[in-house]
Image: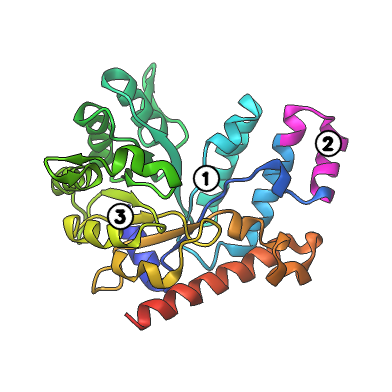
Amino acid sequence: MINLLCGKIKKLGAPVVVGLDPMLSYVPEHVVKKSLSEYGETLEGAADAIWQFNKEIVDCIYDLIPAVKPQIAMYEQFGVEGLKVYQKTVDYCHEKGLIVIGDVKRGDIGSTSAAYAAGHLGKVQVGSKFLRGFNEDFATVNPYLGTDGVKPFIDVCREEKKGIFILVKTSNPSSGEFQDRLISGRPLYEWVGEQVAAWGETCMGDAYSYVGAVVGATYPEMGKALRKLMPKALILVPGYGAQGGKAEDLVHYFNEDGLGAIVNSSRGIIAAYKKEPYAKFGAEHFGEASRQAVIDMIQDIGGALKGK
């Protein structure tokens, strides 16, 4: 899967992933009203509005980008109905030829970690059959519990030829409370980055490992250092756009081959119609606004890389 992802990035010239992280407040009023009129003011109605929103956006952008990244919490808040829509979204994106990065941030140990890995990336045995659960292509993993929590995911990745992105330096403002703490004179995120590189050596694609890293766009100097520590890890970069990360800050996340990183934008794309540059599309054409926002993002990042 890492080879396929890198190939799609190169073919499309778009090191971009769109975060399908829908809050109900992002969904245009006419979409919400239609769903609630059919299902009532229920979790099912809210979930249907999310589904209709996702489908329209995917229909408008699938040919421009290699991958999407649904954040499972945005679906879990609507309970079982939300998880049904998460699954529908994953399946629909696969139908459209998109690679799916499940932003699930799982991290546990032993049989629990193995169950998470099986549920999101692998298969589970039911009688004589082996069945897939959510069936994402990649998943995000929290490494805080150490190798015990990560190894079950790597084992499944090796078997299924899928991948993971391990949290190394996240984009949120308080990430430094733990991630920047010095251990033997070096920040914790560097120690984690070195371990990601070591894990990745055991699970390689053609040029990049099945084991990638999450490094936020909001800390470009740290990203530059981590790029050197993890030369074979694909870096998933959150924090572009709405969180303040700029294209020119991201050039050092990439390798000389023009690959090595994939940049995420979530509400900057899916709620683009609410932003002044795309207001001309109006809420009725929110999908077209998202498409234009994707085009602008690809051009922005491409321009920065050309000037590298």
Q: Determine whether the residue tagged by mark 1 lies in a helix, strand or loop.
A: loop
Circle 2: element type: helix
* Residue 31 on the magenta segment: yes
Residue 115, relative to residue 2: is it above or below?
above
The residue under label 1 is: 70
> Is 99 placed above or below 66 here?
above
The magenta stretch is 30-46
Residue 18's spot in the image, x, y percent?
Answer: 52, 57
Q: Position of residue 138 (x, y in %)?
A: 38, 45
Q: Which residue is mark 3?
A: 2
Residue 203 in view = no
Mark seen at residue 283: none
Q: Residue at x 42, y 74 (%)?
A: 13
Q: Amino acid at mark 3?
A: Ile
Q: Amino acid at mark 2?
A: Leu
| Residue 155, image quadrant | top left
Q: Quadrant of the C terminus?
A: bottom left
